[in-house]
Amino acid sequence: MTDIKQDPSVTVLDSALITLSFPCSAEYVSIARLTILGIAGRMSFSYDDVEDIRLAVGEACSQAVERAMLKPGRALSNRGVGTIAIECHIAPPELIIDVVDDVPVLDSLDDLVNDDFDEDVDRPGLGALLMEILVDSVEVNSGSTGTRVRLIKLAGTPEPG
Amino acid sequence: MNLTIEKRSPSTDTIVLDLTGEIDVYTSIALKQEITQVISDGAKYIVAEMSKVEYLDSTGLGLLIGALKRLRENQGSLVIVSPNVRIVRVFEITGLYKIFNIYESLAEAAEKENLKL
């Protein structure tokens, strides 16, 4: 960790890799968001940028949790299976965040039982839209062993309209 | 942080949900249960007071969209009241501010929606 001289009240992180691993369950997603808040808050991001990063990471984690909660033939439950690993590559002015889960992508959602009033709302689509808007780059790679979402945010980039 | 839901019924078909905390993949389950219950109990209008909501993700948005759609099918509505700037921003960047009626205060919501709050 290195102090920069522009603002002595702020400690800015130098290049580093920080990892966090937790069960792929809904109750842990807020912990991931808090961790990201702490990391991004110590880089040269504006307050709005930090909040954007927090929301984008929350979306990536939520999508993993929702996939883990989906079980063909039964309704959504609160507890999923699997693990989420978050790798934060601090590389000023970039923050590169990989959200990696080991939840296989279902081939078909046809067997899902979900008669809730929001059943036909495209929540994954909404989450993907948010991530695209909130960070500078999003890459998603999914497969039979899980999904890796790479989010990149550059410090000092203009606010999205 | 969790989500606290306080409910009051200022008239027979209107429910005010006073929400405090974070609406995410974890807490939205409880909120969904509450909204499902008030709709099945006959509410036509749901007023979501969100001044103390600090976080809203796509799970919460999806829930609100679903509830709005269900209520509109019964000539009702769901309105958002007093969201902070971060929450407003989520509605704006997703374009959802176009489908939700968002008000700065309960008084404004009452006047514009012709509701007794």
Image (cartoon, rainbow, N blue to C red):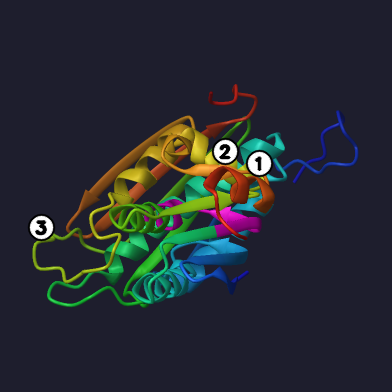
Q: Give the residue pinned by disc 2.
A: B89
Quadrant of the drawing holding the C terminus of chain B: bottom right
The chief SS type of the magenta part is strand
- Gap between marks 2 and 1, in whole Å? 6 Å
Report the amino acid beneath label 2: Arg
* Res A42 label: none
Q: Residue at x 43, y 48 (%)?
A: A98
Q: Position of residue B74 (x, y in %)?
A: 31, 58
Q: Is residue B108 above or below residue B37?
A: above
Q: Secondary structure at mark 1?
A: helix
Q: Is residue A18 above or below residue B34?
A: above
Left or right of A142: which side holds A16?
Answer: right
Which of the two discs, 3 and 1, sits closer to the camera? 1
Q: Does the magenta-highlighted stretch encompass residue B55?
A: yes
Report the amino acid beneath label 1: Val
Residue density around tag 3, few if under 14, some if 14–19, many if 20 or more, within 10 Å: few
Q: Are marks 2 and 1 in contact (CB under 8 Å)?
A: yes
Left or right of A139: which side holds B26?
Answer: right
Residue density around tag 2, few if under 14, some if 14–19, many if 20 or more, within 10 Å: some
Q: Residue at x 87, y 33 (%)?
A: A7
Q: Position of residue A53 (x, y in %)?
A: 56, 43
Q: Is residue B97 above or below residue B7?
A: above
Q: Which residues are magenta?
A: B48-62
Q: Give the residue pinned by disc 3.
A: A107
* Res B85 label: 1
Q: Position of residue B28 (x, y in %)?
A: 45, 67
Q: Secondary structure at mark 2?
A: helix
